Amino acid sequence: MVSTSNRILDDIARLATDAAGAAQGVRREVETVIKTQIERLLRDLDVVTREEFEAVREMALLAREENDRLAARLAALEAGSEAKPEGKTTGP
């Protein structure tokens, strides 16, 4: 009886191991299908990638810095032109 019960326990253990392996396989398959569907949905919605977003963000930051520099330069030029007497102009 002991060898019979060991064999039954071994069969149950093998069945449980196979079931766990099959469940892992199903899980991987479901994850792959869901990932593919989400990627397709995002492509259809024309959502930008993280890399594209970061590149545009960097360009915007550089443009803002340049805009600030140009605004400061313009303010300095305007302040300089206001300091000159109105009757006198330089140039031809």
Image (tube, helix red, strand yellow):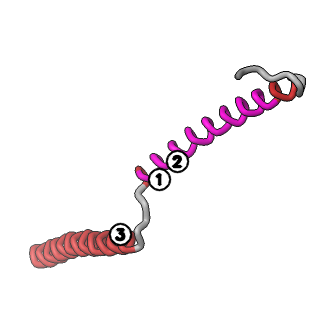
Badge 2 amino acid: Arg
Badge 3 amino acid: Arg
Q: Which residues are magenta?
A: 52-78
In the rendered structure, does residue 57 fall within the stretch colored magenta?
A: yes
In this view of the protein, which residue sits in the foreground, 34 or 2?
34
Residue position for label 2: 57
CB within 8 Å, label 2 to label 1? yes
On screen, residue 1 versus residue 31, left or right, reads left
Residue position for label 3: 43
Residue 4 location, quadrant: bottom left
Residue 77 showing in the rendered view? yes
Q: Residue at x 14, y 78 (%)?
A: 8
Q: Label for residue 12?
A: none
Q: Give the class, few, some or many, for how many residues have Cα within 10 Å of label 2's Cα (few <14, many ≥20).
A: few
Q: Give the class, few, some or many, for how many residues have Cα within 10 Å of label 1's Cα (few <14, many ≥20).
A: few
Residue 1 showing in the rendered view? no
In this view of the protein, which residue sits in the foreground, 43 or 26?
43
In this view of the protein, which residue sits in the foreground, 21 or 54?
54
Q: Quadrant of the N terminus?
A: bottom left
Tell me residue 73's x, y (percent).
Answer: 70, 29
Q: Secondary structure at mark 1?
A: helix
Q: Residue at x 41, y 50 (%)?
A: 51
Q: Is residue 17 positioned above or below 57 on the image?
A: below
In this view of the protein, which residue sits in the foreground, 15 or 40?
40
Q: Give the class, few, some or many, for how many residues have Cα within 10 Å of label 3's Cα (few <14, many ≥20).
A: few
Tell me residue 82's x, y (percent).
Answer: 86, 29
Q: Secondary structure at mark 2?
A: helix
Tell me residue 14's x, y (percent).
Answer: 15, 72
Residue position for label 1: 53
